[in-house]
Image: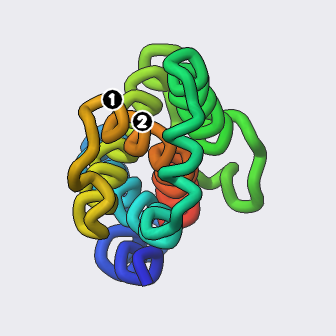
Amino acid sequence: IGISIGKSQLGSNRGGAGNKSDLEGDGGHINYQAQMALAFCGAILIASNVAPTEEILLIAITASTIQLILISLFSMAIGAAILYFIDFTGSDTSVIRPEGWKDILAGVIIMYAIALLVSTGMLWFFGRLEGLSLFMAVAEIVVLSFPGSVGASAGRLLLQT
């Protein structure tokens, strides 16, 4: 549902072959507002399926601080790989064309921030943050941000191609 809504609202090319996509701004630069909306839709699609499960809490309870940091770094690495380095079908026509490592880093940070935001919202919506200590709430958010970041990066890639 999230992918189809995002595709119909943000990811379509309204004109013929000569027109720019909604995801490209002036001068062929990336339209970050549209990219963020697509990442948000993708993250919601995946995180909403995982957030109400007990596994998020169980992983968060058993994870140490180092493991949570590694989950966070791995989430960003997987998101970067999906967006920029893995050659999916149709990705050669993608409008995500980074001009250097700064664009890649900015895209990954934005994608992960959206995944964290969506994860927080999903856990709050399902009542999974009530009565938890700050560390446990952050641990659950970080754990859920892994599937959220996969959804955010895959959603951007799928919706724009």
Rendered-image quadrant of the C terminus: bottom right
Mark 2–mark 1 distance (CA, rounded to whole Å): 6 Å
Q: Which mark is residue 156?
A: none
Q: Furthest residue to the front?
A: 131
In this orientation, which residue lies closer to the viewer: 125 or 11?
125
Q: Dot 2 corresponds to which residue? A: 139
The residue sitting at 44% across, 63% down in the picture is: 51
Task: Mark 1: give few (<14), some (14-19) or many (20+) Cα within 10 Å.
Answer: few
Task: Mark 2: give few (<14), some (14-19) or many (20+) Cα within 10 Å.
Answer: many
99 vs 39: above or below: above
Query: Where in the figure is residue 110, as x and y percent of width and height?
Result: 35, 35
Disc 2 vs disc 1: Cβ atoms closer than 8 Å?
A: yes
Amino acid type of the residue tagged 2 in the rendering: Ala
The residue sitting at 64% across, 37% down in the picture is: 78
Dividing the picture into quarters, in which one does residue 26 lie? top left
Query: Where in the figure is residue 119, as x and y percent of width and height?
Result: 36, 52
Q: Is mark 2 on a helix, strand or loop?
A: helix
Rendered-image quadrant of the N terminus: bottom left
Q: Dot 1 corresponds to which residue? A: 135
- Residue 100 shows up from this direction: no
